[in-house]
Amino acid sequence: MAVKYGTQGSDILIGTYQDDVIRGWAENGDPSTDLGDQLAGYGGNDELDGGGGNDTLFGKDGALPRLNCSPMLSCCLI
């Protein structure tokens, strides 16, 4: 399982073909102050959380990706 963190700015983060946890904010940062991110999970059972900002999350192939969808968030299960 990979755990990936972004930065407090806009990020594009792509998961692996295993179970991933992908966070759009910096590891020791505040999720609520994060800017918009694009997160993509592929195979496996992924957990995607963009934090604050206007995020776009893409899930694919896992059993049921867990997407944290807030009012300012676009979620796409492909």
Image (spheres, rainbow, N blue to C red):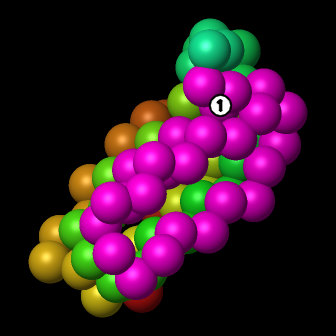
Question: Does 53 appear in magenta?
Answer: no
Q: Position of residue 39 (x, y in %)?
A: 59, 59
Count every numbered label the image shows and give the total. 1
16 falls in the magenta region: yes
Name which residue lies at 71% across and 48% down: 37
Q: Which residue is mark 1?
A: 25
Name the residue nearer the viewer: 19 or 78.
Answer: 19
Q: Residues within 10 Å of mark 1 (few under 14, many from 20)?
A: many
Q: Quadrant of the N terminus?
A: bottom left
Above or below: residue 69 compared with residue 65: above
In the depicted view, which residue is nearer to us: 23 or 32?
23
Q: Is residue 54 above or below residue 64?
A: above
Residue drawn at point x = 75 percent, y = 59 percent? 12
Q: Is residue 66 above or below residue 73?
A: below
Q: Residue at x 40, y 82 (%)?
A: 17
Tell me the kind of residue under disc 1. Trp
* Image location of residue 60, percent across then percent down: 38, 83
Mark 1 residue element: loop
**In this picture, which residue range is highlighted in magenta?**
1-27
